[in-house]
Image: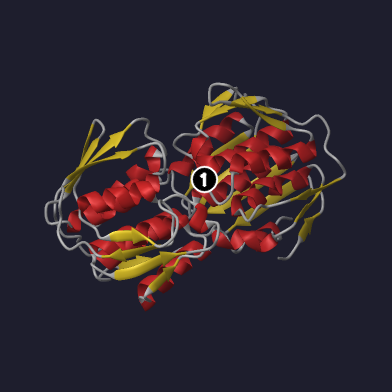
Amino acid sequence: MSQILLPRKTSFPNTTIPLPSSKSESNRVLVIDSLTEGQNNIENLAEARDTQTMIRLLKNDPAIYDVLDAGTTMRFLTAYAAVTNKQKVMSGTDRMCERPIGILVDALREIGADIHYLGVEGYPPLAVNGLPEQKSSKIRIRGDVSSQYISALLMIAPLLTRGLSLELTGKIGSRTYIEMTLQLMLRFGIRCVWEDNVIHVPSQPYRPTSYKVESDWSGASYWFSLVACAEEAEILLTGLKKDSLQGDAEIVHIMDKLGVESRFSDNGVHLFKKSVSGLPSFDFTHCPDLAQTVAVTCAIIGQKTIFTGLESLRIKETDRIYALQQELAKINARLDEGTDDSFTLIPTADIPDQVNIHTYDDHRMAMAFMPLMTKTNVAFDDAEVVNKSYPSFWKHVALLK
């Protein structure tokens, strides 16, 4: 682990940040490309470790798919290995093997996949032995646990001989990520129908095409936060589109209320300071990866806010609710849990002269707290943790004038 210290800096004039490509788009496109037997022209894949892991495993095709700490890679490749009748062991880091996968495995087994656990029931590691015969074309799956389970099933559905009708039960979380998957499938020729809570995917071939991955809106969120927290700032984020497929583009509307004006151009989006109109509450059900960013922003700028839709944060790279509570306390802010699945962000009243942030092996904990540099000197215990999604993050921070 390597530490990094950011000295306090309050103003950031005329800075251009060359954002990396989207990990979420890249990982989906890579699976689709492999299901099209690599006949596509794919450009601008993400530099993120998760994506590079996916590229390496698909290219080298080892007997053991060691996904390291990549949740999307674990879930997507489990379904991919089943539908392509590969015999694979799915494994990863200790933390990856603590993250549940039972809902996806149960669904794949119901369809006809031969999968068994090599350790604790419901968790990796597991052995996938293909999908010898489709047993069912209609399955039900909870919509409130992980949209990655749903996306994994959707992407393999066209290759099933009978197609697939997927009924989502209960509350649907991260809906925008499911919509992104369907839109990307459409770009590669797959037509689906989403009626009420059922997604119908007929059996059909993917069609080769060309696709350029957009810049990453999740990574963009930290720069929005920096502008919101700074005294003065003007930042250009390159490669972003107003009509993005990524759900985390919601950060534009959130930060509009927290003091950031967005102006789109052919180059990307320009960020400017504006007055804060206020964000009394927000539901993160469909964009949970923005929760840490917004929580830190509100804490720094003095915005009390009620958060809902944080249920999935407990099973991410770390328990992100616990991690936020611990690190926000270091700047005298709080994230108080209510009795109705809500959390109240109580902003800081006083920030120490230096703050040391623990990252909990979670890339988003490091990046979310970067804007604290606008108020104090801030140190991070594991700078390299950002490699999971944004390896060039600290190099881009060094571009700040």
In the image, 11: left or right of 245?
right
Residue linked to disc 1: 315
In the image, 66: left or right of 9?
left
Q: Residue at x 55, y 52 (%)?
A: 317
Residue 361 picture quarter: bottom right
Quadrant housing the C terminus: bottom right
Image x and y of residue 183, in percent: 30, 48
In the image, 316: left or right of 124?
right
Q: Give the residue type at disc 1.
A: Ile
Q: Residue at x 53, y 22 (%)?
A: 340
Residue 170 picture quarter: top left
Image x and y of residue 399, in percent: 69, 60
Nearest to the observer: residue 246 or residue 107 = 107
Nearest to the observer: residue 20 or residue 362 = 362
Image x and y of residue 369, in percent: 69, 46
Can residue 51 be seen in the rendering of this structure?
yes
Q: Secondary structure at mark 1?
A: helix
